[in-house]
Amino acid sequence: MLLQHMTWGAVEAYLKERRDILVPLGSTEQHGPNGPIGTDAICAEAVARRVGEQAGAIVAPTVAYGQAQFNLAFPGTISATARTLMSLLHDIIVSVAEQGFRHVYFVNGHGGNIAPAESAIQDAYHQQRGGPPIRCRLRNWWDFPEVNVIRDRLYGDWEGIHATPSEISISQAVLAAAAPELGERPALTPQSPELLRDHERDRHYGQAAHRETFPDGRIGSDPWLATREAGEELIEAAAGAIAADLARFTAEDG
Ligand code: NI
């Protein structure tokens, strides 16, 4: 169920039955030579919507802006500072907590969001006064073994860590006919495992250094391997894993 399509009365009725809500987190940033700017938001939203269908859970509007300062030298990137993102996520948590939601599940599609989002969650716990305690969980859609087995099988070392063929596949599946053409694959030189490790979880430097180090916007990936079929398989696997995780999460404290 999409929150945007519900009435307040329908939400009130939902809260008499259950108290969980999904919030997709994305980013608005370059995704390599052939990936759409909205890739992270598109992926998180597609997976969260599928979970919502499977679990009968409410899906809040996608937070489409993330912490992506390192990509600002690529046109089209719009970044929120970490503190802006923290404030917004805090406000989302407080809003739903005051209405009786107990379990907020963030489905994340962007590494740069992890640190601010986890910090916002801790601050919300710190500041909550009165009312039933809220619980939040953040998971990246690629976190789960069921998803990683597909990424490894299809792409191996060419999955990389940004503009990955997996995320571009999901965007291709979601956008279908409107997806950008992948175009001709140029010769790609693999980036060193040490370099990729240093940049994991989007621990990048500033925007000028970032564009210089990764001139076409990819990080270790081969997005030309993306297919719609893979995207559909990945959405289904991620949604199944998250639906199961959501069930465990909501069962923790009733
Ligand atoms: Ni991405």
Image: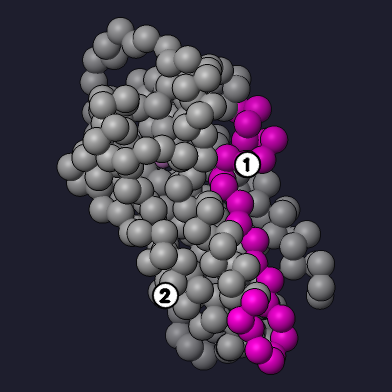
- In the image, what residue occupies the spot 46% across and 57% down? 25
Q: Which residue is mark 2?
A: 5
> Is residue 247 or residue 137 the one in the foreground?
137
The residue pinned by badge 1 equals 143
Q: Which mark is residue 189?
A: none
- Rate crowding at label 1 as few (under 14), some (14 to 19) or many (20 or more) other CA atoms within 10 Å: few
Q: Amino acid at mark 1?
A: Asp
Label 2 amino acid?
A: His
Find the distance from the CA under tag 2 to the CA under tag 1: 29 Å
Identify whether 202 is placed above or below 194: below
Q: Quadrant of residue 149?
A: top right
Identify the residue shown where x is 48% and y is 88%: 8
Q: Position of residue 5 (x, y in %)?
A: 42, 75
Q: Is residue 71 above or below residue 95?
A: above
Residue at 80% of width from left, 67% of height from top?
A: 251
Whether residue 52 is visible, yes or no, is no
- Its colouring scheme is one colour
Say which element carries label 2: helix
Q: Which residues are magenta?
A: 126-150
> Which one is nearer the viewer's eye here, 74 or 226?
74
In this view, 83 is above or below 181:
below
